[in-house]
């Protein structure tokens, strides 16, 4: 099942995709929560109920609603740095021996077809194609062998990065360079985990204006999805709707010669096998 969230007059509501139509799952079955986080918290039983609602509910044209980020305000956006060896090396780093983790503010969350806004304060905005993991049932100290039971869904993500802020400011902090508004688009929809038999073997690529800039497979992840969930859940409690951006392969703009940075009018597309295409146009900040 593919889940999206749309903006209604009463606030965000979760919906399922059926071909080119969407079905409001809570309107179809009042037992299905209207909030995506509450739905994901119910685990596989909630997903099964939502699937029945999707099959029976009244479809609406997707153009008739305004889609927003599939999780409108994730509590946490956890990001993994240097998780593909070729990308670590292109940035001048040895592949890490333990996961490198940082965060984006949840206010950076954005959606398929929403613009990436180039901040006035940065001249070096870059793209990063990433597999995004969406937590369902939360937990702390999750063992690796149970980790995938805590994943509700997967989708494509773009870890948009202001390199001048990430790499050239005192303190060595990545937080602000990764957290400008619109810098965490993900989607186009959440693909429930039952439709993703192996998150560790998915082709991933990023196209910039149609040209392939990054091309790899999640089988190249240094720390695969279960390791990341287990590791970070030793530090903090994961909750429904938390996102994990799992890292990007080589081919990012700042490591190219000549360097490539995003400019107004560009279109980025992240495509992951079975998860669709996340497309975003780049615009200047007004
Ligand atoms: Mn990244």
Image (tube, rainbow, N blue to C red):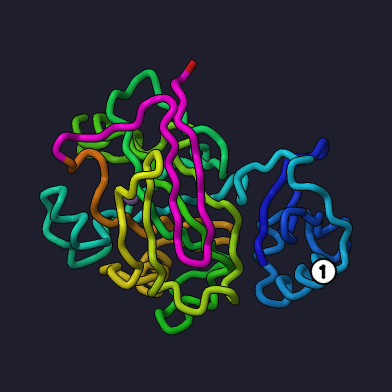
Residue 242 position within the rendered picture, expressed as x and y whole percent measured from the top left: 53, 57
Confirm whether the magenta stretch covers residue 68: no
Q: Residue at x 52, y 42 (%)?
A: 109
Residue 4 position within the rendered picture, expressed as x and y whole percent measured from the top left: 67, 53
Count of numbered tags: 1
Q: Which residues are magenta?
A: 257-285
Residue 262 position within the rendered picture, expressed as x and y whole percent measured from the top left: 34, 31
Left or right position of 45 against 262:
right
Task: Categorize mark 1 by other alpha carbons within 10 Å: few (<14), some (14-19), many (20+).
Answer: some
* Position of 281 relative to 194 (above/below): above
Q: Quadrant of residue 215?
A: bottom left
* Quadrant (top left/top right/bottom left/bottom right) for the N terminus: bottom right
Where is mark 1, residue-wise? Answer: 55
Confirm whether the magenta stretch covers residue 276: yes
* Position of 122 relative to 236 (above/below): above
Residue 37 position within the rendered picture, expressed as x and y whole percent measured from the top left: 66, 57
Residue 25 in view in this figure = yes
Of 144 and 1, nearer the camera is 1
Of 152 and 89, nearer the camera is 89
- In the rendered image, the residue lying farthest to the top is 286
Q: Residue at x 27, y 63 (%)?
A: 99
SS for dot 1: helix
């Amino acid at each position: 099942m593919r889940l999206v969230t749309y903006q209604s007059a009463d606030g965000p509501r979760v919906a399922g995709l059926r071909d080119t139509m969407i079905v409001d799952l809570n309107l179809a079955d009042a037992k299905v929560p209207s909030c995506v986080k509450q739905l994901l918290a119910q685990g596989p039983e909630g997903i099964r109920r939502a699937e029945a609602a999707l099959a029976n509910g009244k479809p609406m044209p997707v153009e008739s609603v305004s889609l927003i980020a599939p999780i409108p305000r994730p509590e946490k956006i956890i990001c993994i740095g240097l998780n593909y060896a070729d990308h670590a090396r292109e940035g001048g780093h040895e592949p890490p021996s333990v996961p490198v983790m940082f965060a984006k503010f949840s206010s950076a969350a954005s959606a398929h077809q929403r613009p990436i806004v180039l901040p006035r304060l940065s001249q070096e905005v870059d793209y990063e194609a990433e597999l995004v993991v969406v937590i369902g049932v939360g937990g702390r100290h999750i063992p690796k062998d149970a980790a995938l039971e805590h994943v509700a869904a997967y989708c494509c993500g773009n870890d948009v990065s202001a390199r001048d802020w990430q790499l050239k400011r005192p303190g060595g902090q990545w937080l602000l360079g990764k957290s400008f508004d619109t810098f965490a688009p993900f989607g186009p929809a959440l693909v429930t985990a039952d439709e993703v038999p192996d998150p560790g073997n998915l082709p991933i690529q990023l196209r910039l204006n149609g040209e392939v800039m990054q091309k790899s497979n999640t089988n190249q992840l240094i720390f695969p999805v279960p390791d990341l969930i287990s590791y970070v859940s030793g530090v903090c409690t994961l909750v429904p709707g938390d996102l994990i951006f799992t890292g990007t392969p080589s081919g990012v703009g700042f490591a190219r010669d000549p360097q490539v940075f995003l400019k107004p009018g560009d279109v980025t597309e992240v495509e992951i096998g079975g998860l669709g295409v996340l497309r975003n146009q780049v615009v200047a900040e007004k």
